[in-house]
């Protein structure tokens, strides 16, 4: 449904621009629309600009509130019309008439709002399409319900939860799992590891499978519906899937080629950004232009990562003197999910699962970090500070997409608390990654565990298609100004 809605929006952009250009050519300007290649190019550029605006504003995923839809639609059409008008003025090319530019904005604005409201109603109607009956433990049930309430890759509702004892036939000889699935009109049955070992539960699942219900292990359900792997499964599956960058040389070569191509193209942004950032630093962020920090890359090898500095040098020194476990002036608790899922992961003591990491070099940056000034906060919001890392990509330290590299001090601590943590170092770290587009920034072992679930999903499904999907979501975040 989402893909259909997005396609309709993009096709609407094409239709309105072409139709208004045709009307202007036939009834107002009296010219042949196809006699100018430049005019056709500008029409295509306008369509692309509108489509990028639709994606960046979130109209492709219909806003839930009318006010959000109005603001998103208004911002998209006003921004796109402004960009095209300014570009034509700057280049001295007025081949795309104002009638087309502003007429398109006038037509598409209300159309976007109407389609957004229709899409939201359809989404609400179909959100319960996948109804899940889960045979899991109590803690896992709490975690699963919370995960489905966030931002799943495929919408579903938890219709019923049974433990192994109540789902099995037992002495009664009944079919509790079948009865629960029938009563709740379930479409998916999920079995945890204990349920898979119970013959009576598996037999009932097989019966439901024959009736057309989908049956999934807990790990597969997390993978397909949530885009991650459950904490309890990480250690068990860490060796049970191929990693394309390790096991497929062709993909590794193509990925490196794409990295270099993107990095070279990105230099067009980096070169003009240097003097602009230098001037901004003089105004409100005095100090060195670049910030260098040691990070852990592929194979556990350390490298120096480059960024435009966003904090005052004295702010970093003061941060280093804070008591261990304090980030940004206060302790940052871990998310609720790991605890609800049964506390610590295998090999991780429950007492330390949500504990903040102990900074030995520089603490992680949290959302709204007080150490950031206005200039630094703006740079992070639009991700300008990341541009120098294109040089790391050219050197081969980084890839465009991969697990985000961490500081050696944190890696050392996480290796001790998460035995399978080093699996993420089998591939090149990235400028962006699946965990970055799915999860917030964190500063505790629990946050690291949460991110690792998404990173294992990436490792399991690594490929050019997923890389492109991550880049698209990252661009959407950047265009929307969602930085930390």
Image (spheres, grey):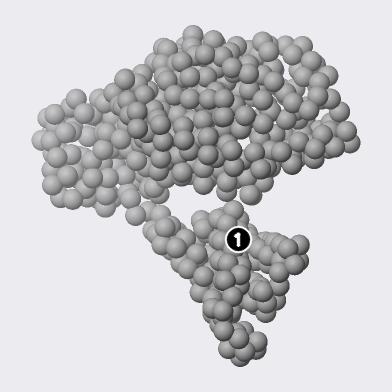
Residue 48 lies in what quarter of the image? bottom right
Tell me if residue 195 can be seen: yes
Q: Residue furthest right?
A: 283
Residue occupying the point 69% across, 17% down: 362
- For image coordinates 65% across by 66% down, the residue present is 77
Q: In the figure, is residue 123 to the left or right of 220? A: right
Q: Is residue 27 above or below residue 48?
A: below
Image position, residue 398 (x, y; %): 54, 27
Q: 347 or 264: nearer the eye?
A: 264
Residue closest to the eye, 161 or 472 = 472
Quick one: SS at disc 1? helix
x%, y% of residue 345? 42, 19
Position of 184 with respect to 302 (left or right) is left
Numbered-mark total: 1
Q: Is residue 13 above or below residue 298?
A: below
* Left or right of residue 437, residue 203 in this image: left
Q: Which residue is mark 1?
A: 49
Residue displayed at 56% across by 43% down: 474
Q: Position of residue 167 (x, y in %)?
A: 22, 34
Q: Position of residue 416 (x, y in %)?
A: 49, 9
Which quadrant is the N terminus positioned in? Answer: bottom left
Quadrant hosting residue 219: top left
Kindly identify the residue that appears in the image at 89 percent across and 36 percent down: 283
Question: Viewed as shown, does residue 122 lie left or right of 103?
Answer: left
Mark 1 crowd level (few <14, some 14–19, many ≥20, 10 Å Cα): many
In this orientation, does residue 371 appear? no
Residue 437, compared with residue 192, is above or below; it is: below
In the image, 63 versus 131, the foreground residue is: 63
């Amino acid at each position: 449904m989402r893909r259909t809605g997005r396609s309709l929006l993009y096709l609407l952009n094409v239709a309105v621009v072409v139709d208004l250009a045709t009307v202007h050519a036939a009834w107002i300007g009296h010219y042949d629309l196809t006699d100018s290649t430049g005019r056709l190019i500008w029409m295509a550029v306008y369509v692309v600009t509108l489509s990028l605006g639709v994606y960046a504003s979130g109209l492709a995923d219909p806003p839930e509130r009318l006010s959000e839809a109005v603001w998103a639609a208004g911002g998209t059409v006003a921004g796109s019309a402004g960009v095209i008008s300014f570009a034509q003025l700057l280049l001295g090319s007025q081949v795309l008439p104002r009638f087309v530019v502003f007429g398109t904005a006038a037509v598409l604005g209300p159309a976007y709002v109407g389609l957004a409201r229709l899409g939201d109603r359809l989404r609400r109607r179909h959100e319960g399409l996948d109804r899940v009956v889960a045979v899991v433990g109590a803690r896992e049930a709490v975690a699963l319900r919370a995960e489905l309430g966030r931002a799943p890759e495929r919408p579903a509702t938890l219709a019923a939860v049974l433990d192994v004892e109540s789902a099995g036939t037992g002495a009664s000889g009944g079919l509790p799992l079948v009865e629960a699935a029938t009563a709740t009109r379930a479409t998916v049955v999920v079995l945890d590891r204990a349920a898979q070992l119970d013959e009576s539960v598996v037999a009932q699942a097989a019966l439901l499978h024959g009736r057309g219900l989908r049956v999934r292990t807990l790990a597969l359900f997390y993978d397909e519906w949530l885009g991650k792997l459950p904490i309890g499964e990480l250690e068990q599956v860490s060796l049970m899937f191929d990693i394309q960058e390790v096991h497929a040389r062709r993909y590794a070569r193509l990925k490196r080629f794409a990295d270099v191509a993107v990095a070279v193209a990105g230099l067009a942004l980096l070169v003009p950004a240097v003097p602009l950032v230098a001037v901004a630093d003089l105004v409100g962020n005095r100090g060195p232009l670049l910030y260098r920090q040691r990070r852990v890359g592929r194979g556990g090898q350390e490298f120096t990562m480059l960024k435009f500095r966003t904090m005052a040098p004295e702010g970093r020194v003061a941060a280093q003197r804070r008591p261990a476990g304090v980030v940004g002036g206060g302790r940052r608790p871990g998310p609720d999910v790991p605890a609800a899922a049964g506390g610590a992961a295998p090999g991780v003591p429950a007492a330390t699962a949500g504990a903040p990491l102990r900074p030995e070099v520089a603490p992680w940056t949290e959302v709204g970090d007080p150490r950031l000034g206005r200039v630094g906060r703006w740079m992070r919001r639009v991700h300008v500070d990341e541009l120098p890392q294109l040089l790391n990509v050219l050197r081969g330290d980084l890839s465009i997409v991969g697990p985000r590299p961490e500081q050696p001090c944190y890696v050392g601590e996480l290796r001790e608390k998460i035995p399978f943590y080093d699996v993420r170092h089998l591939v090149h770290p990235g400028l962006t990654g699946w965990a970055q587009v799915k999860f917030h920034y964190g500063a505790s072992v629990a946050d690291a565990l949460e991110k690792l679930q998404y990173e294992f999903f990436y490792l399991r499904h690594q490929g050019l298609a997923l890389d492109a999907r991550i880049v698209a979501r990252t661009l959407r975040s950047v265009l929307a100004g969602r930085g930390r």
